[in-house]
Image (cartoon, coloured by chain):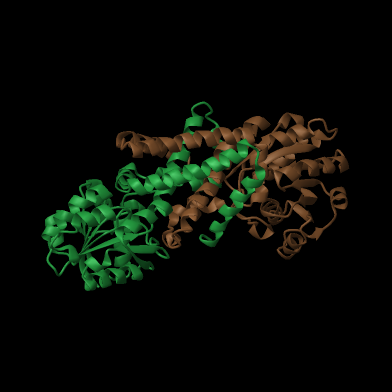
Chain colours: A green, B brown
Amino acid sequence: MFETITIVGVGLISGSFALILKDKGLVKHVIGVSRTESSIQKALELGIIDEALPLEEAVKKSDLVYVAIPVDATIPMMQRIMDLITDKQIVADAGSTKDALCQALAGHPMRKRFVATHPMWGTEYSGPEAAVREAFTGRTCVICEKEKSDPEAVATIEKVYRELGMRVTYMDAHSHDMHAAYVSHISHITSFALANTVLEKEKEDNAIFELAGGGFESTVRLAKSSPSMWLPIFKQNREHVLDVLNEHITQLRKFKSCIEKENYEYLRELMESANKINRIIH
Amino acid sequence: MFETITIVGVGLISGSFALILKDKGLVKHVIGVSRTESSIQKALELGIIDEALPLEEAVKKSDLVYVAIPVDATIPMMQRIMDLITDKQIVADAGSTKDALCQALAGHPMRKRFVATHPMWGTEYSGPEAAVREAFTGRTCVICEKEKSDPEAVATIEKVYRELGMRVTYMDAHSHDMHAAYVSHISHITSFALANTVLEKEKEDNAIFELAGGGFESTVRLAKSSPSMWLPIFKQNREHVLDVLNEHITQLRKFKSCIEKENYEYLRELMESANKINRIIH
């Protein structure tokens, strides 16, 4: 499918992307661009990239430039890349927010060579050593503002994600960011807050974690996520994140009020209503 | 180790317990006691129990009676069982709260034959079909009020849990309930509330779940837990659950306030502080 691709940022997402493309024979040569020397070294060792080059050289040689860096850094990086490409090349990003980026690139003369994507997969880990070949499979990838990209560029990117085992869906950037706040960003905030709740208690009682079981681990594991990645997401998606955070606090207050007032009938209703999530996750 | 044991309640915990004991050759014959005919049938089919008997007959034949039913039902059940046993038999429970039960049994003439235990393992599923042979391993089991049980009974129960691959730790019942609120009960409430938050949104936007990725699933999976099991836990552990729920809402409000006021420096600090959970869960 590709002769050469460049991944900008050499981490969990771009690393997994490159590994799978190589495994499936969809690319011959992968170039890595990163300011982090240790990530470059690790990615070379792990066979994620074949060489590391400065951005300009890398872009020049590539059929596809795939950007997966924190969403605040993505905007200026993408502007630089799109100043460098020809209309034979494709640029895509993998960021967790889409509205600010799409707006920033709206007027760029090469806008049509850019495909805005969000493969909805991740773990709490980062860096090339976190990259895995099982990434993406069975998940959904959102493509935003499809109509602003060349149909041929969209078709190529779609084909790649389908080869990765993803479902592809389309959305405007604003809707994407709202949805992402509900099904991803809020989960991270509740995990961060839950970790702080228990770590706070640990200050007076250092045996608290001796008992931490499976349920605790699964609800709190996202609290290990990188602030450098998540802070810019919360910042760019501020309005939607606030909406859902307010709603979540309201829902928690309902549980609190039931327990306080010993209204166990309503508490049971709240739990039964939550059980309906069964329909969605199996 | 045992000739015959009875499990009272034939579900996730007691089922896993019986399966592993059989696998390891620690028991020859397992009797099941349950009011739910379908659970009995399923447990017989799955080889979890060898026969089903009414409580009195079952207890009479058993070296150990192991009770794993909702914590509200545990108290009267345990009182009935302890009226039936001799001082050659052992009774243990597996409940998620310990204070109310220990208090209820404090004056019973056979108190010393009872060992209060909480193996800190579970999943969001229930029923005998949810029982697994990999349960318990690597987790912690709390034994409460050790000093009120016969040392020989405690030693036997400890040995069983160690054979299951558990670490055994001791705690007074009050401390146990406080700890459990922090590392288990609150995780369930946040999951229930998160499920309701997103299900609420779905009413106006039914595509919301198309995007649900791995992070969402792990934070929300406990929302599938059984209200019949969890309602009595929240009820019995009301004070501690309220304490930690209040603290958790306070922590969430800190995130909200940072995002509202665009105080991103403090937001980063909150996330970095949450990252310290790394020390605890790997």
Callout count:
0
**Residue that appears at 29% across and 45% down:** A232
Q: Is residue A114 left or right of residue A250?
A: left
**Residue that appears at 35% across and 44% down:** A226
Q: Is residue B143 above or below residue A179?
A: above
Q: Is residue A88 left or right of residue A121?
A: left
Closest to the observer, A248 or B59? A248
Q: Which quarter of the figure is the N terminus of chain A placed in?
A: bottom left
**Residue that appears at 65% across and 38% down:** A262
Point out the residue furthest to the front here.
B204
Residue B141 occupies which quadrant of the picture?
top right
Q: Is residue A89 above or below residue B151?
A: below
Q: Is residue A159 above or below residue B199?
A: below
Residue A95 occupies which quadrant of the picture?
bottom left
**Residue that appears at 55% across and 31% down:** A207
x then y, percent, for residue A99: 28, 55
Closest to the observer, B35 or A64? B35
Residue A174 occupies which quadrant of the picture?
bottom left
x then y, percent, for residue A149: 22, 67
x then y, percent, for residue B93: 73, 43
Q: Is residue B175 visible?
A: yes
Q: Is residue A244 left or right of residue B50?
A: left
x then y, percent, for residue A129: 34, 52
Q: Is residue A9 visible?
A: no
